[in-house]
Image (cartoon, rainbow, N blue to C red):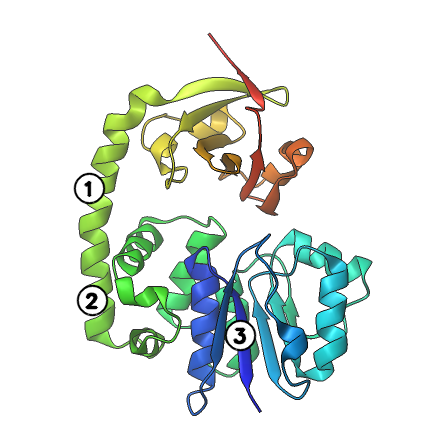
Amino acid sequence: MAIHCIYHRSDFDGIGSAAVVNYFHTDSDVIMHPYNYHDPLPDFQNWDPADTVYLVDLCFDKGSDMQALYQRFGDNLIWIDHHASGLSIEKDFNLSEIKGIRREGLAAIQLSWEFLFPEISEPVCVKLLGDMDIWNLSEEAEVFAYGIEAQDNLFSPKDPMWGDLFKSTPFTLDQVKHDGSLMHRYVMRDYKAYSEFIHLVNFNGVIVPAVNRGCIGSLIFERNIPNLYKDYLFVLVYYRRKDGWKFSAYTSRNDVDVREYSKPQGGKGHPKACGFVCNELPFTFMD
């Protein structure tokens, strides 16, 4: 019977989770299905009900589709997720019997390792990628994440280099850290130069710093604003896409859940990092 893995294709938490699945099934050819929210569903109704199906770092947008997936595969379905939206669907649609782990607080790559390798401590790559995904920031995690993104081959969860990372092969770890260090130094200089584009906005009644730029996180603020999270609750990054304005909200404060402040816009994700898309800018500029 076949083994399928539906994984969140948009970041290395999802890709890495699928790589953990592939690493566990070393002697099998796992069929990978990259997926993002709002994508057309994989054609799972035409898969053999006896197949094993992993769903990692996400759930389908509709609870009814999750029910259909469970009804077709039953105990052969393994669902690993850490998003509040997934936990809500699990509760609202009575899906707690599905195998796997649904829990906030750790990244999906960490939960995937915990589920498949419960007797083996998580490798350093799993820990550092997990920290970046849930915004448990450190310079070590930042450097490592940049190093991972520098390896074009790692965008495939079936690349053999993932196995070397899970084995903590020194040469591979050193290569990633070296490449990440170079990229990190460049990006930090770039962020410093971009500081003049940071501006204040009133977002849902809260004054926060914002910047209009894609493919960045909160570090642009943290490198430029002293006492950032003492003076502000969170920050906003936004840019224009074909489907609207894409927003990400970030914080390092433990007393702030950015999803709550983004609720009018449908913010989804984690307490310290969430995102949403809207047709109009949802804030007013401050003088």
Q: Along the horizontal axis of the image, is 27 left or right of 185?
A: right
Q: Name the one closer to the observer, 155 or 81.
A: 155
Quadrant in the picture for residue 4: bottom right
The amino acid on which the numbered mark 3 sits, given as a three-letter code, is Cys
Query: Dot 2: what SS?
Result: helix
Marks 3 and 2, how far apart in space?
29 Å
Between tags 3 and 1, which lies in front?
3
Give the residue at mark 2: 174
The amino acid on which the numbered mark 2 sits, given as a three-letter code, is Asp
Q: Which mark is residue 5?
A: 3
Residue furthest to the top: 287
Say which residue appears at 25% left-offset and 68% top-offset.
173
Q: Which mark is residue 186?
A: 1
Whether residue 257 is visible to the viewer of this picture, yes or no, is no
Q: Position of residue 115 (x, y in %)?
A: 57, 77
Q: Earlier in the sequence, mark 3 or mark 2?
A: 3
Image: 54 above or below 261: below
Between tags 3 and 2, which lies in front?
3
Q: Earlier in the sequence, mark 3 or mark 1?
A: 3
